[in-house]
């Protein structure tokens, strides 16, 4: 009889690899079976596609972070109102209002990307920032993209739709 001593670390590693292979195979079978299916994203408010007001909490424009607000005016054939809109971005820091940024005219079917770091810097501000994007008459779609490089070692990003005023919960 021969006794083989195996490192517990190697046993755990082999178990983890086996679990990943089994999980990957199961996910592959489910995907082939059509369990995961892509559906078009929709964001409907009380006035059709989008909302007139969007809220974004807990953004950050300090060193290593890059925050963007993306505003889309859907064309009429996609549920939009078919008119040019000019939303504004209200920025708030820990001590209250920072300033207001005009997005400018956005024709139906167009999108505008606004760098919040640059918009806040116009007011001499960098740091925690919450956002309200608003148009008084017409709904639109709005999202926030954030990218980060933390200490040159951890990088990543996120994308979220804001909270819509009048959204169905």
Image (cartoon, rainbow, N blue to C red):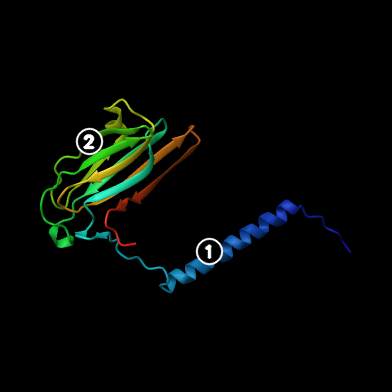
> How far across and how far down the image is residue 108, in percent?
14, 52
Please tell me which residue is depicted at 14% across the width and 51% down the height of the picture: 137
Q: Secondary structure at mark 2?
A: strand
Looking at the image, residue 56 lies above or below residue 123: below
**Mark in front: 1 vs 2:** 2
Looking at the image, residue 29 lies above or below residue 59: below
Q: Check residue 114 in the rendering and tell me which mark sits there, or answer none.
A: none
| Nearest to N terminus: mark 1 or mark 2 | 1
> How far across and how far down the image is residue 74, in percent?
18, 55
Q: Secondary structure at mark 1?
A: helix
91 and 154: which one is in front?
A: 91
Q: Estimate the spatial distance between the alpha carbons at disc 1 and disc 2, rounded to whole Å.
A: 46 Å
Q: Residue furthest top?
A: 124
> How far across and how far down the image is residue 51, in percent?
23, 54
Please tell me which residue is depicted at 27% across the width and 57% down the height of the picture: 166
Q: How many neighbours does mark 2 have within 10 angstroms: few (below 14), some (14-19), or many (20 or more)? A: some
Quick one: quadrant of the C terminus?
A: bottom left
Please tell me which residue is depicted at 28% across the width and 61% down the height of the picture: 42
Q: Residue furthest front?
A: 96
Q: Check residue 24 in the rendering and tell me which mark sits there, or answer none.
A: 1
Q: How many neighbours does mark 1 have within 10 angstroms: few (below 14), some (14-19), or many (20 or more)? A: few
140 and 29: which one is in front?
A: 140
Q: Residue furthest bottom?
A: 33
Please tell me which residue is depicted at 62% across the width and 58% down the height of the picture: 17
Q: Which residue is mark 2?
A: 101
Query: How many circles with numbers are drawn on the protein?
Result: 2
């Amino acid at each position: 009889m021969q006794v083989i001593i195996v490192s517990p670390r190697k046993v755990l590693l082999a178990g983890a690899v086996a679990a990943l292979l089994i999980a990957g195979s199961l996910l592959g079978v489910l995907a082939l079976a059509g369990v995961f299916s892509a559906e078009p994203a929709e964001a409907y408010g009380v006035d059709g596609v989008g909302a007139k007001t969007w809220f974004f909490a807990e953004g950050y424009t300090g060193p290593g972070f890059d925050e963007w607000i993306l505003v889309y005016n859907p064309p009429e054939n996609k549920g939009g109102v078919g008119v040019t809109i000019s939303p504004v971005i209200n920025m708030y820091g820990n001590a209250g209002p920072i300033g207001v940024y005009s997005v400018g005219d956005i024709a139906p079917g167009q999108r505008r990307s606004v760098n919040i770091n640059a918009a806040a810097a116009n007011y001499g501000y960098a740091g925690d920032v919450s956002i309200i994007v608003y148009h008084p008459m017409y709904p639109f779609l709005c999202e926030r993209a954030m990218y980060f490089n933390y200490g040159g070692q951890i990088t990543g990003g996120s994308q979220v739709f804001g909270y819509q005023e009048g959204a169905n919960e």
